[in-house]
Image (cartoon, rainbow, N blue to C red):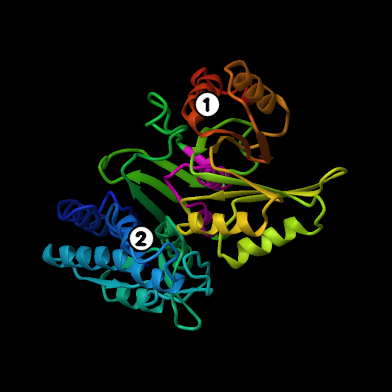
Amino acid sequence: MTKIVVLKFGGSSVANLERLQDVARLVIRKRDDGFRVVVVVSARAKMTDSLIADARFFGPEPAPREMDMLLTSGERISAALLAIALHSSGAEAVSLTGSQAGIITDDDHTNARIIEIRPARVLQALSEGKIVVVSGFQGVSFRKEITTLGRGGSDITAVALASALEADACEIYSDVDGVFAADPAVVREPARIPELSYQEMQEMAESGAKVLNPRSVEFAKLKRTIIHAKSTFVPDGEGTIIKDLEGRIKPRVVGIASEEKVLVVDCWETGQPGIPAAVTDFLAAANVKVKQMAFHWTADRGMLGNFIIPEKENYHVESVIPKMEQRFHGQLAVARHLGAVSLIGAGINDRYDFLQESLALLAGNSIEVFSFHTSSFRISLVIKREELNRAVSLLYERFLREGESRLSE
């Protein structure tokens, strides 16, 4: 049977009609190479931000359900226009919304999770020889409510569909040729990473790298779906392969990522037990996504809570924070001036060297570290936002520009 390939195109790839025409040509070439092709598209560049701004004209807290109804229109426009472009080029194509493609989610408006894929309509169209163009970023709940998957959710749509269809590969197209070891806008000529493990890619994305949505990698891991991150504008580029590499790579630093727009919330129990739990409940009720939380007990202030909140994934957070500060007055502090820089790599915490040298490097360059957090694949350092770019450059030069990590030798 002819192999299936899923192609995903981001907002810059479909930003205008000329680029949509270029995408149509690329899709047809893939079909002519002998593949059955499913295409997932994002909204055109800046469209989602523009729609959010329109909604906020009427108030700072638009209803989440109506936001989902509004924001899904951007991807539907891209899908329909690409299908029209394909038709005009002589290719049979059909555009489908997320719900028509069988993307079933929970009921968490603006940040839903896929719980099932029912791709019967996709498979039927493929069997008829059609190219299937799916609106990314969206699905439908069991209650028949339109939902969205969070910022960058078109990646999730693409990889989830590729996994459900047992596709040969999932190719993610953007304006850069793969995943780089640091942001090219910050670091001079950073290296392209040829291969990444699923966990490394997930940590890179969680830490601010913009090539892939971190939740998309979860679906790839389930069925070992190979992801190929490529550039729409560099047809012959090698890109980056994301696949199962666990157990085959030594401890290393593979990339440096940063996230500027985070809020750090600290709370404590002094004179009022249960505050961290109450803050957790407050954030959950306000539908605020928390990136990381930590709790520990102290003798003088009782239980302390720490929450790291990504601003970009919480479009309404600026209206929530003042209410939280009022509700927990005297028991809570919000830092709006901090960001996080992260070192990513398999086995990065097998020894203390990476953490010790990172802290020493930043201290030696007068960059204060307010806290740090580690996992098996990541070291994140919380610093002032205005120091992020300098920290990224320093860490890149130390751990990557100078050659392969000493721990990989």
Which residue is tagged 1?
391
Badge 2 amino acid: Ile
Q: Quadrant of residue 360?
A: top right
Q: Secondary structure at mark 1?
A: helix
Badge 1 amino acid: Ala
Q: Where's residue 131, x and y in %?
A: 26, 67
Instruction: Tell me how far mark 1 sits from mark 2, CA to CA.
Output: 32 Å
Which residue is tagged 2?
52
Q: Where's residue 6, x and y in %?
A: 37, 60
Q: Quadrant of residue 375?
A: top right
The outermost residue toward the bottom is 143
Which of the pair 285/35 is nearer the observer?
Answer: 285
Q: Is residue 204 magenta?
A: yes
Quadrant of the drawing holding the N terminus: bottom left
Secondary structure mainly formed by the magenta segment = helix
In front: label 1 or label 2: 2
Which of the pair 372/93 is nearer the observer?
Answer: 372
Asked if one can make out residue 42 in the rendered structure from this viewpoint, the answer is no
Q: Is residue 154 magenta?
A: no
Q: Secondary structure at mark 2?
A: helix
Vertical position of residue 41 compared to residue 73: above or below: above
Q: Which residues are magenta?
A: 195-221
Q: Where's residue 92, x and y in %?
A: 19, 70
Quadrant of the drawing holding the C terminus: top right
Residue under the point 25% across and 66% down: 77
The outermost residue toward the right is 299
